[in-house]
Image (cartoon, rainbow, N blue to C red):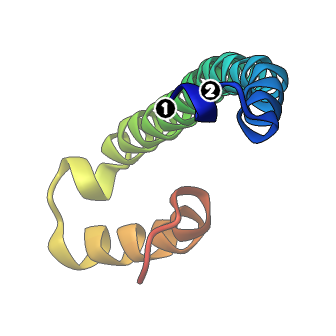
Amino acid sequence: MVEFLSSLRFRLIVLVLLAVIPAVGLILLTAARQRALTAGEVQRNALRAARVIATEQERVLESAHQLLITLSGFPQVRKKIEPLATGCLRDCWSPCTQTFGLRT
């Protein structure tokens, strides 16, 4: 065993390991930092996207609310005159499908 520890092969292996281990440690540390930075960036992007979507949903809901207020002002709808109200609502439906992404 003493013979192996004093051999040139063993000394070269130890020298290579001493040179490689700090480099591997640095690589692992850098990867961990990069992973943390990326996770933070992903979280910020997700939050930003959620805010944009929430703002858009709020706009759509407000538009729908305004449309319902407008429709409730039509005499045909107020008086519940079925044929006239149906025709009125049908005429109003087409532009709404584009505004709200609805299907006919």
**Element at badge 2?**
helix
| Residue 70 can be seen in this image | yes
Q: Looking at the image, which residue sits at the far front?
A: 3
Q: Residues within 10 Å of mark 1 (few under 14, many from 20)?
A: few
From this view, report whether residue 27 is shown above or below residue 60: above
Q: Is residue 80 found left or right of 33 in the rendered image? A: left
Tell me residue 22's x, y (percent): 77, 16
| Residue 52 can be seen in this image | no
Tell me residue 49's x, y (percent): 61, 33
Q: Is residue 26 found left or right of 29 in the rendered image? A: right
Tell me residue 66's x, y (percent): 46, 34
| Mark linked to residue 88 | none
**Element at badge 1?**
loop
Question: Do the residues bearing badges 2 and 1 touch, measured as CB atoms within 8 Å?
Answer: yes
The residue type indicated by label 2 comes to: Leu
Quarter of the image holding residue 84?
A: bottom left
- Residue shown at 82% from the left, 35% from the top: 8
Residue at mark 2: 5
- Residue shown at 49% from the left, 29% from the top: 54
Viewer-nearest residue: 31 or 26? 26
Q: Residues within 10 Å of mark 2 (few under 14, many from 20)?
A: few
Q: Looking at the image, which residue sits at the far bottom?
A: 104
Q: Tell me the quarter of the image containing the C terminus.
A: bottom left
Quarter of the image holding residue 88?
A: bottom left
- Residue shown at 61% from the left, 32% from the top: 3
From this view, report whether residue 5 is shown above or below residue 61: above
Quarter of the image holding residue 61?
A: top left
Viewer-nearest residue: 10 or 77? 10
Q: Is residue 95 found left or right of 72 in the rendered image? A: right
Residue at mark 1: 1
From this view, report whether residue 37 is shown above or below residue 24: above
